[in-house]
Image (cartoon, rainbow, N blue to C red):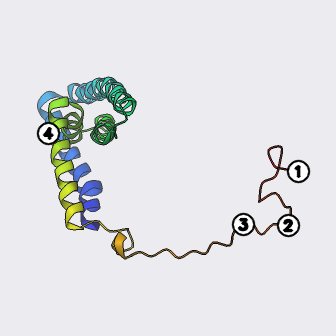
Amino acid sequence: MGVNWMILFVLVPLLELFLLIRIGRVLGAVNTVLIVILTGVLGAAFARTQGLGIIGRIRTALGRGELPGRELLEGVMILAGGIMLITPGFITDLAGFSLILPLSRHWIAVRLLRSMRIRMGAGAWTGGGGEDAADVVIEAEADGGDSRSDGDGGRSGPGALQ
């Protein structure tokens, strides 16, 4: 996992810098900066409209009494794509647009959901501490009430019985 974060935070910015310099040599520095600004502004606006659409789909699913799992995943993807688009660079722009554009987002979401189902079915995900959820035991004792001596069952204030 540590190597993945190293790639994300070290290698990607280095590649972005390399591409910005190369493209700046071909198109000119001003044009390159304008392209970066333009993709950021257009991407943020498109992420906003797509995000509002997803919020509508989430509300509709909840109104029907359904769990909006896929819609929530796509909402997170749109948020991540929007963040990538406001980050200067061409690699992050490509990744950001692929998470925001509906066709590519749908394609990625289907594969992510399939991967999650496979991992969950195989028991590959654990409770964070390295234990399977089925192996975790929580012990508790019921003592029949609150141990406070105020006589109102632990409630106080205007709604408490006097």
Left-right relation of 66 to 112: right
* Secondary structure of residue under mark 2: loop
The amino acid type found where label 2 is placed reads: Ser
Horizontal and vertical percent position of residue 112: 20, 49
Where residue 78 sits, quadrant-wise, is: top left
The amino acid type found where label 1 is placed reads: Gln
Where residue 102 sits, quadrant-wise, is: top left
The amino acid type found where label 3 is placed reads: Gly
State which tag comes first along the sequence, 4 or 2: 4
Quarter placement of the N terminus? bottom left
- Residue shown at the point (88%, 50%) measured from the top left: 162
The amino acid type found where label 4 is placed reads: Trp
Q: Residue furthest left?
A: 26
Horizontal and vertical percent position of residue 62: 38, 33
User: How many residues crowd mark 1 within 10 Å: few (<14), some (14–19), many (20+)?
Assistant: few
Q: Mark 2 highlights which residue?
A: 149
State which tag comes first along the sequence, 4 or 1: 4
Does the CB distance between marks 1 and 3 fall below 8 Å?
no
Q: Mark 3 highlights which residue?
A: 145
Between the C-alphas of marks 3 and 2, the distance is 11 Å
Q: Mark 4 highlights which residue?
A: 107
In front: mark 3 or mark 4? 3
Give 86 or 120, whichever is nearer the viewer.
120
Q: Mark 1 highlights which residue?
A: 162
Where residue 46 sits, quadrant-wise, is: top left
Between the C-alphas of marks 1 and 3, the distance is 17 Å
In front: mark 4 or mark 2? 2
